[in-house]
Image: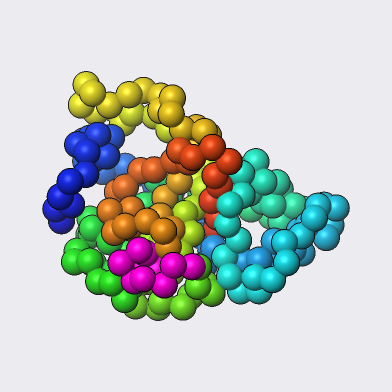
């Protein structure tokens, strides 16, 4: 694991112990949901649609809003559309080789829209193709944080200091990947996160059971 000096042990402890988890076949979107896709949903739902955006990833949504989009998309397509589980998200990012980041084991600034890149805003989805995972999925690190369907829990066999509930989170669901405001620690495939700022939100991508 790459070292991240100065970060609390608790950030890493809740990723332990490392283990192999069986994940059933699934499909996951190559990119996060965009503003344009979100506006299509808002037009049907009767919600106020955000201005601008285009192919930028939608962001700052509550978990229930992302879930509502999935329900609508399921009705439109006639198939299952849902948020990925935490395990599915990590599988899409990590592949089979236990890599540290979606693109490999060494951090590369050009691969993710994080604080290290210095842009300070979201980019259109797919703008950094060098950051693709082994399955060709992009934007799994940086740009916008992403909701999963999984509520936080301590992994079986986790260190004693790992809490069973994150009482300081404003939503119990895990987010993954980090945003353009976050540092490279949140780009790690194993990094478990949440929404810890009141009124904060995230973006999302969709998945389906294959």
Looking at the picture, does residue 179 appear above or below residue 117? above
Task: Describe residue 184's horizontal placement relative to residue 153 as left or right.
Answer: left
Looking at the picture, does residue 22 appear above or below residue 33? above
Residue 191 pos. (x, y %):
31, 47
Is 113 colored magenta in this rendering?
yes
Task: Describe residue 153's horizontal placement relative to residue 17 as left or right.
Answer: right
Task: Describe residue 4's horizontal placement relative to residue 191 as left or right.
Answer: left
Residue 16 pos. (x, y %):
23, 36
Residue 94 pos. (x, y %):
31, 58
Q: Assign the magenta stretch its main secondary structure.
A: loop
Image point 24% across, 34% down: which residue?
A: 10
Which range of residues does the magenta coloring cover? Answer: 112-121
The image's colour scheme reads rainbow
Residue 19 pos. (x, y %):
23, 40
Q: Nearer the viewer, residue 1 or 62?
A: 62
Image point 41% across, 77% down: which residue?
A: 128
Q: How many marks?
A: 0
Looking at the picture, does residue 70 appear above or below residue 168? below
Image point 50% across, 46% down: which residue?
A: 148
Quadrant for residue 206, please give it: bottom right
């Amino acid at each position: 694991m790459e070292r991240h000096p100065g970060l609390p042990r608790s950030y890493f402890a809740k990723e332990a112990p490392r283990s192999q988890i069986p994940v059933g076949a699934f499909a996951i979107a190559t990119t996060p949901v965009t503003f344009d896709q979100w506006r299509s949903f808002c037009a049907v739902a009767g919600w106020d649609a955000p201005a601008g955006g285009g192919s930028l990833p939608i962001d700052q949504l509550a978990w229930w809003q992302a879930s509502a989009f999935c329900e609508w998309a399921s009705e439109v397509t006639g198939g299952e559309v849902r948020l990925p589980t935490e395990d599915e998200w990590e599988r899409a990012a990590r592949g089979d080789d236990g890599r540290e980041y979606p693109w490999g084991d060494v951090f590369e600034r050009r691969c993710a829209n994080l604080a290290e890149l210095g842009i300070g805003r979201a980019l259109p989805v797919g703008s950094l193709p060098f950051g693709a995972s082994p399955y060709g999925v992009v934007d799994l690190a940086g740009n916008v944080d992403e909701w999963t369907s999984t509520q936080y829990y301590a992994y079986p066999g986790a260190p004693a200091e790992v809490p069973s509930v994150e009482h300081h989170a404003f939503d119990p669901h895990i987010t993954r990947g980090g945003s353009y405001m976050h540092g490279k620690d949140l780009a790690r495939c194993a990094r478990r996160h949440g929404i810890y700022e009141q009124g904060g939100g995230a973006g999302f991508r969709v998945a389906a059971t294959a």
